[in-house]
Amino acid sequence: MTSTSDKLSVVEKIGYSLGDLAANLIFQTLVSFLAFFYTDVYRIPASSAGTVIFTGGLLGAFVFTPMMGLIADRTRTRWGKFRPWLLWTAIPFGVLALLAFSTPQFGDSGKLFYALATYTLLVMVYAANNLPYSALSGVITGSMAERNSLSSYRFTAVMIAQFVIQVLLLPLVLILGSGDKVRGFHNTMLLFAIAGTVFFLIAFFTTKERIVPAAEQRSSIREDLTDLARNRPWMLMLLATVLVFINLALKGGMYVYYFKYYMDEAALGAFLQGIGFNAFIAGLNNLLTGIGLTEFQWPKDTPTSAFSLFSACGIICMIIGISFSKPLADRFGKRDVFGGALFASTLCLLAFWFFPPTGVGSVIAAYIVHGLLYGITTPLLWAMIADVADWSEWKNNRRATAITFSAILIGLKLGLTIGGALVAKILAHYGYNPDLAVQSAEAVHGIKMAVSVYASIPFLLCCALLFFYKIDKRVEMQLERELAARRVSQQ
């Protein structure tokens, strides 16, 4: 292996992080609103929506992602292995995102086919873009400390995208569609597609691949897969990734239903009024209309405003939590910090079971604490996966970064697929009917179970897996030291 200086500039860290900002404008929309878009906007039955999400996700997990991992590791251009894919997929990604959230008026079967086709194509391009992007973090630098720093920048960008989606997307949909959700989703996704394309190009032009496999390294697909099969840390991280993203997709997709159908609307309105939120929005609207932006009125829907405030509080606290991630990981090691913070954040999710529909303050307070704790974990998952690629290189004297990340991204997609499908399937199982303004007691009970008990189970299982993951602080330092010496000797 050869490498240059492991020190990264702030410009490169920001440029790299913009790639995740671009991807997550789409990714977070899929996680939080695809089921809602299919059931309440495109009017696809909940059970059929679950089938679309599950089928497209399985293709992404078990066909597109591993195929892309093998292709990316064997890509050779003057820009490197992974960077060029950001350039090649920037425009297709934006176009397909727009198509996936469009609503052509077909019959029931035509809608189902269109949803499946566009979602599957979007998942395919997402694999071609995000797998090389993720693998790029493993070859930008060999320094564990710089990786921790890079991950913090990256996931701050992720949280900004999540803030935009969870806090501003529904208001944007109503604003840009003048109350028409169909037109609003189309215009909002057009805006995201343009911004995402620009950010992908910035990420391409500002980054550099530094860890380059030795020219004589040649490995077959069989050798790459054999290395993975013998890589116990990789297997554990694969399972952990599946579990984490089941949780994210499940609770992320359910929160919009939780505020719309479980929380008491009168209590939400009283809370917003009591903390001055309504007065703030009224002042903002007056300012906007005063400068001629007459279309830009904040939605009058109380659950939408409360959901936006809830999401904003959580995401801001996640960003604060991310700032503690690097110093804690540098001191105690990624594994121990990740596991401890994840377990504590899970207790906050379990608390949702005990909150009554009128307990607005308690719900928001629990989510604030959850955000602080979960924010610590978000950069560490991907930094740990880069460590797993180092462990494989250290043990086998061969580096296959993309196939390592692709296997983990299979777990990500599988987790999102299971979690996203669970949203629709749980709703269908408990008798959710989008045509009803007030849901049945059974449907409301299912929504409450989903955001509390059901969402906590994957996190608790993930914490248990970490007892078997042996790359602690001591092993991290050993891998960095010995691999650095080996790469110098091969120059």
Image (cartoon, rainbow, N blue to C red):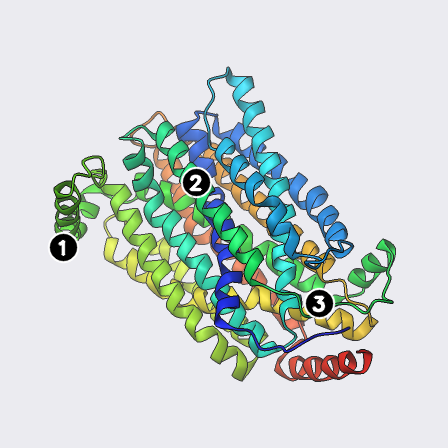
Residue at image x 39%, y 36%?
443
**Left or right, 195 with reference to 417:** left
Between 336 and 113, the residue placed more toward the observer is 113
Q: Amino acid at mark 1?
A: Gly
Alpha carbons under labels 1 and 2: distance apart:
28 Å
The kind of residue on which mark 3 rests is Ala
Cβ atoms at labels 1 and 2 below 8 Å apart: no
N-terminal label among 2 and 3? 2
Q: Earlier in the sequence, mark 3 or mark 1?
A: 1
**Residue found farthest to the front:** 78
SS at circle 1 = loop
Q: Nearer the viewer, residue 73 or 11?
A: 11
Residue type highlighted by circle 2 = Phe
Residue 280 in percent (x, y) is at 15, 52
Residue holding disc 2: 33
Q: Is residue 354 depicted above or below 151 in this figure? A: above
Residue 111 x %, y % = 52, 22
Residue 347: image location, x then y, percent: 42, 64
Q: Position of residue 349 (x, y in %)?
A: 41, 58
Position of residue 312 relative to residue 37, above or below, is below
Residue linked to disc 1: 276
Mark 3 or mark 1: which is in front? 3
Q: Secondary structure at mark 2?
A: helix
Is the residue 98 above or below the residue 275 in the image?
above
The answer to whether one can see residue 484 in this image is yes
Residue named by callout 3: 389
